[in-house]
Amino acid sequence: MSISTASRRALSRIGGALRRSFSSAPDSAAGYQVSGGPSFMRAAVFWEPGRPLTMEEFRMPRPKAGEVLVKTKACGVCHSDLHVMKGELPFSSPCVVGHEITGEVVDHGAHTPAEIVNRFPVGSHVVGAFIMPCGNCFYCVKGQEDLCESFFAYNRAKGTLYDGETRLFLRSNGKPVYMYSMGGLAEYCVVPANALAVLPSSLPYTESAILGCAVFTAYGALRHAAEMRAGDSVAVIGVGGVGSSCLQIAKAFGASEIIAVDVLDEKLQNAKTLGATHTVNAAKEDAVEKIKEITGGRGVDVAVEALGKALTFSQCTQSVRDGGKAVMIGLAATNVVGEVDITRLVRRQVKIIGSYGARARQDLPQIVKLAERGAFDLKNAISRKCKLEEANSAYEDMNKGKIIGRAVVEIM
């Protein structure tokens, strides 16, 4: 019996659909590979506090609808990962940490809408934001993607994507490994398309990785939380990777005075190259008094706390002028509590605002444009580059305060 060409095409479509349906179960990831490429990859796994990251082989992670498989080129080394690795922030384990990435699109999940495929075709260079908005929850619909319910309920609470499943399974036994954001310390990662922006070829993979967290966090703090205006005075307390990004964003937004506060002279010297007009070593002088002295006794319009410590929280609230804004972006260990002068808060209209990050769909493309036109100096923001196998030492040095700006892991 002969079969027509149309019938063969129909059968092919049915067969492909059946293969995709059958392969949606976690165990089927063993047979997934991209266009004849590898069927497995390597990633750095966190097991428990006090135990070093280990390099493990994984089945190739399979994206689902609305998700993109990215061949990771670079991943930033962030203090938030370190909080997890030290047990200071509860998170599901074992997991792959790393949450600010750049890479190349290699595949899309089955049934991904055409507009996503067209926006991020295979071969596209992309940058990923650590807050990965679902796009459908109460907050995403209101435009507040930095409060996405699904991101916090699934990824931060359970280490999964928004169907309640991880995309990471060990090659040896198929056991699941959880994802801190997209799990960026890996040769490939699955990212919800809502968290991606196109990276122009003029911007390098390595330096651009920090756009997805360090710069993303700084942008959200000053653009949305502080609603900073040109001419505002800004103090940044703690000028590591995220704090130094705040200096650059403040400069890009037209701040009149930019005061960098830290306890390491080397970081303060670096801050001057990134836009700081004044520096204060809080180990040698009273930071609050010095900030007020610089601002004619009033305090700054906006102060940003980028360390997550009770002392710096207090310094931040005391450094702002009457009616000023104290913006908190530093994550703290569980149960760390900050104190505030309630009477001054009430009488002098001091505003204390928490800010976790920016809004991926509306802000990440704007952040990329800032970098593209040179308003953000990516090169000088990076103080160290290392290989995937050297990620442990990078986190160890960060824990010891030896990394001045931002470290980036170069992966492929």
Image (spheres, rainbow, N blue to C red):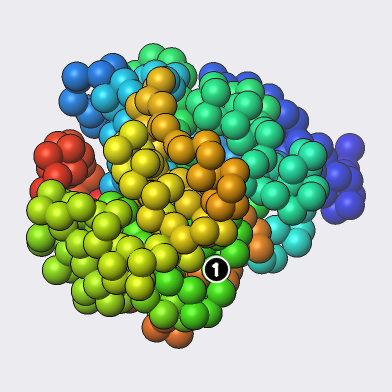
What residue sits right under mark 1 in the picture?
228
Nearest the viewer among 200 and 213 is 213
Q: Residue at x 67, y 48 (%)?
A: 145
Across and down, in percent, residue 289 comes to 27, 57
Is residue 360 visible in the rendered image? The answer is: no
In the shown orientation, is residue 185 left or right of residue 233? left
Badge 1 element:
loop
In the shown orientation, is residue 114 left or right of residue 352? right
Across and down, in percent, residue 339 comes to 42, 32
User: What is the total number of numbered labels drawn onto the structure image?
Assistant: 1
User: What is the residue that sits farthest to the bottom in this orientation?
Assistant: 373
Across and down, in percent, residue 11 comes to 82, 40
Nearest the viewer among 204 and 76 is 76
Nearest the viewer among 97 and 396 is 396
Q: Residue at x 51, y 26 (%)?
A: 159
Relative to 170, does residue 173 appear above or below in the rendering? above
Task: Tell me the quadrant of the picture where the C terminus can be found.
Answer: bottom left
Q: Within 10 angstroms of label 1, few (less than 14), some, or many (20 or more) residues? A: many
Relative to 199, does residue 402 appear above or below in the rendering? above
Nearest the viewer among 271 and 181 is 271
Q: Residue at x 59, y 48 (%)?
A: 347
Q: Residue at x 17, y 37 (%)?
A: 399
Across and down, in percent, residue 90 comes to 42, 20
Q: What's the amino acid at mark 1?
A: Met
In the shown orientation, is residue 264 left or right of residue 17? left
Is residue 6 visible in the rendered image? The answer is: yes
Say which quarter of the image contains residue 337: top left
